[in-house]
């Protein structure tokens, strides 16, 4: 199956896979799709540089991309004011009390707290772009809409197309007006930051709004070849996938994610919740005892981004370190109900393509 997306990005299959793991991203690219590495976890530009160097040597020359998070500037960012000073003491106490109630131990001695916080800041995201453009990337995506105009101009000057996620047709129109080349119509079912309109409704609305000017990908609730075929039938030229790769064998390389994967494998499609607890913006997460605590009557309202990130960053480290699947904090979409075993990326990709072919053959026979 080839579409205009394949021609634009130089890939074999119209399947883009977002992941925070360079191991997974490289494997997706090697399998004929496009792996897109999420940069938000990189506080230090040198760490991102090392990860992209690794990808340059492990993608077999296949195209790959990066995903940055460039939210609007917090007024105090870049000033002498410490962002942590803006976090109410009551919120801090609630987090510590909840971790104690959940039996979550402190971080191991010597492990730095707050890993991953800085990646959510606009200024750090700009450094991610600086690093990425030194590498042979074929796509820059922004999880929070279009990047600033100067970033789009820089990407285009390097011959790199820019993608942005949209939860409404009106968002898609603004993205195109700002110079975005690929719009990802991300439905309500998706993991991470997501809007309120389901994919079945959203994708054709976005295609009708901007599909004559830019490429439109479908995201949200896509984890099988049948769902890829449905996305194409709705007018998309490819799919953007994310949650599907969290239970791949490559995901655990470079870090212990066994508790997270056990939690995901045991979850059903109804075991997610859309909440602001993770970043301060609405995001779909795995429902656990941690998310339940934040929905209790006595829980405070989550803070705006990036203050919520700063508030819960160490907590998320501790939750991941605890090894308890009942308390992990992980963005994931409703497709989690189909994620029932750990498989290599190549096997997952083969399954998607095989079922896509079977679905298209079955539909052709209905004519």
Image (cartoon, rainbow, N blue to C red):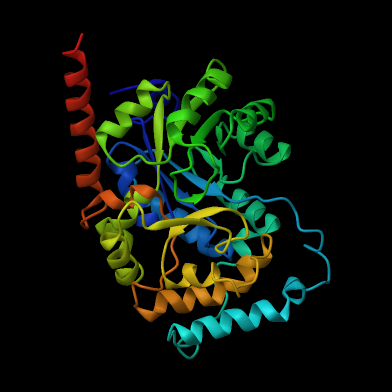
Q: Is residue 58 visible?
A: no
Residue drawn where x is 47% and y is 69% of the image: 292
Residue 84 vs 167, above or below: the answer is below
Q: Residue furthest bottom?
A: 109
Q: Residue furthest front?
A: 297
Residue drawn where x is 20% and y is 14% of the image: 364
Residue drawn where x is 32% and y is 32% of the image: 228
Q: Nearer the viewer, residue 81 or 62?
A: 81
Give the quarter of the figure containing the C terminus: top left
Residue drawn where x is 44% and y is 76% of the image: 319
Q: Nearer the viewer, residue 193 or 292?
A: 292
Residue 183 coordinates in the image, percent (x, y): 54, 31
Residue 2 vs 269, above or below: the answer is above
Residue 196: which quarter of the image? top right
Residue 89 vs 365, above or below: the answer is below
Q: What is the number of callouts on the image?
A: 0
In this picture, residue 366 sits left or right of residue 196: left
Give the quarter of the figure containing the N terminus: top left
Residue 6: which quarter of the image? top left
In this picture, residue 220 sits left or right of residue 79: left
In this picture, residue 95 sits left or right of residue 316: right
């Amino acid at each position: 199956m080839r579409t205009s997306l394949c021609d634009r990005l130089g890939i074999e299959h119209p399947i883009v896979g977002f992941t925070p793991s360079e191991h997974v991203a490289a494997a997706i690219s090697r399998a004929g799709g496009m792996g897109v590495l999420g940069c938000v976890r990189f506080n230090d530009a040198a760490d991102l540089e090392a990860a992209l160097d690794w990808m340059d040597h492990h993608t077999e020359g296949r195209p790959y991309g990066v995903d940055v998070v460039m939210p609007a500037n917090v007024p105090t960012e870049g000033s002498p004011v410490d962002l942590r000073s803006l976090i109410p003491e009551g919120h801090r106490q609630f987090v510590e009390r909840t971790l104690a109630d959940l039996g979550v131990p402190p971080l191991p001695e010597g492990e730095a707290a707050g890993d991953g916080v800085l990646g959510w800041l606009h200024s750090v995201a700009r450094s991610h772009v600086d690093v990425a453009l030194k590498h042979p990337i074929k796509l820059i995506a922004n999880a929070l809409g279009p990047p600033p105009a100067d970033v789009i101009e820089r990407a285009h000057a390097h011959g790199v197309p820019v993608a942005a996620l949209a939860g409404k047709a009106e968002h898609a129109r603004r993205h195109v007006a700002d110079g975005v080349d690929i719009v990802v119509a991300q439905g309500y079912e998706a993991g991470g930051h997501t809007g309120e309109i389901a994919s079945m409704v959203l994708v054709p609305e976005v295609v009708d709004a901007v599909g004559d000017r830019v490429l439109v990908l479908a995201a949200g609730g896509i984890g099988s070849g049948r769902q890829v075929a449905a996305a194409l039938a709705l007018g998309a030229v490819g799919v953007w996938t994310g949650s599907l790769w969290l239970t791949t064998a490559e995901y655990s390389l470079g870090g212990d994610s066994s508790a997270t994967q056990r939690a995901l494998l045991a979850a059903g499609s109804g075991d997610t919740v859309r909440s602001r607890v993770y970043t301060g913006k609405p995001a779909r997460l795995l429902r656990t005892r941690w998310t339940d605590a934040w929905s209790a009557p006595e829980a405070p309202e989550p803070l705006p981004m990036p203050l919520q990130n700063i508030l819960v960053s160490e907590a998320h480290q501790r939750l991941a370190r605890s090894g308890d699947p009942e308390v992990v904090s992980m963005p994931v979409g409703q497709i989690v109900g189909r994620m029932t075993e750990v498989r290599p990326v190549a096997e997952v990709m083969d399954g998607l393509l095989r079922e896509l072919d079977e679905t298209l053959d079955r539909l052709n026979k209905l004519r």
